[in-house]
Amino acid sequence: MKILIVEDDVEAAAFLVKALGESGHTADHASDGETGYHLADSGNYDVMIVDRMLPKMDGLSMLKKLRLEDDQTPALILSALGQVDDRVEGLRSGGDDYLTKPYAFSELLARVEILSRRRTTDDSSTVLKVADLELDRLSHKVTRQQTQILLQPREYRLLEYLMQNAEKVVTRTMLLEKVWDYHFDPQTNVIDVHISRLRAKIDKDFDTPLLHTIRGSGYMLRTPAE
């Protein structure tokens, strides 16, 4: 999992980054709510761990702002405030779970893993669409302008991930982790080769390209501007 930690206690954040790394996850850290908001808005995280009391923008305000922008990344709120009213306010502000400090890391990890699984389970859409490109996740049928496009299994997984993240920049690291299940850079051009093959199949014979290279960042599948 890719996890965002928004915590102003530097030592507590360093512990979480290290412990999550040892558990096989990657974690980014923001020490204030404004930085956390900007990272969450652009980082495509699986789960957020958000301290409630933060400088510049408190954790609940950060979550409210993200939810208003339709960012549904699961969020675990951490707080020393543990009364029922505090927990209810946190959940109503956009939190998906609430854990009171001090906490046991094993419990935090279990809650984070449950939130991640819940997000995967909730992604129940069986047909993904970007402009006139459609992917049926039940039949694995891909069409554009009602013309069927035949993809190899890895090309299909690549397209599915890009369509799930349409209109967002998808980095090479994200593709390696989510499509190839690599947690390291193999130092090959495997992504470039598959992107080229996929682009030839979904764009070459059509008037408007959908798959774009974002120089220095990664790739994006997007609907053409009107």
Image (cartoon, rainbow, N blue to C red):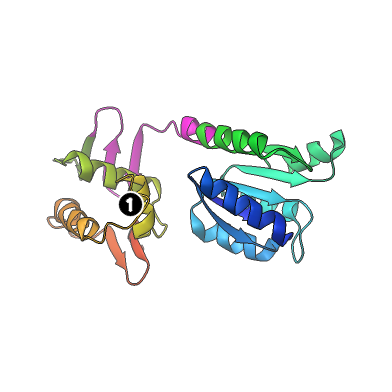
125 in the magenta segment:
yes
Q: Nearer the viewer, residue 199 or 171?
A: 171
Left or right: 157, with 100 as reference point: left
Amino acid found under the numbered disc labelled 1 = Leu
Residue 157 x/y as whole percent: 28, 42
Q: What residue range appears in magenta?
A: 118-140
Left or right: 194, with 101 as reference point: left
Q: Residue at x 40, y 56 (%)?
A: 167
69 in the magenta segment:
no
Residue 185 x/y as whole percent: 32, 58
Residue 25 x/y as whole percent: 49, 46
Element marked by disc 1: helix
Left or right: 181, with 103 as reference point: left
Task: Determine which quarter of the picture holds residue 206.
Answer: bottom left
User: Quick check: 14 above or below 146?
Assistant: below
Q: Residues within 10 Å of mark 1 (few under 14, many from 20)?
A: some
Q: Nearer the viewer, residue 5 or 201?
A: 5
Q: Residue at x 32, y 72 (%)?
A: 215
Q: Number of marks in the image? A: 1
Residue occupied by mark 1: 176
Specify the farthest residue to the bottom.
216
Q: Residue at x 57, y 35 (%)?
A: 115
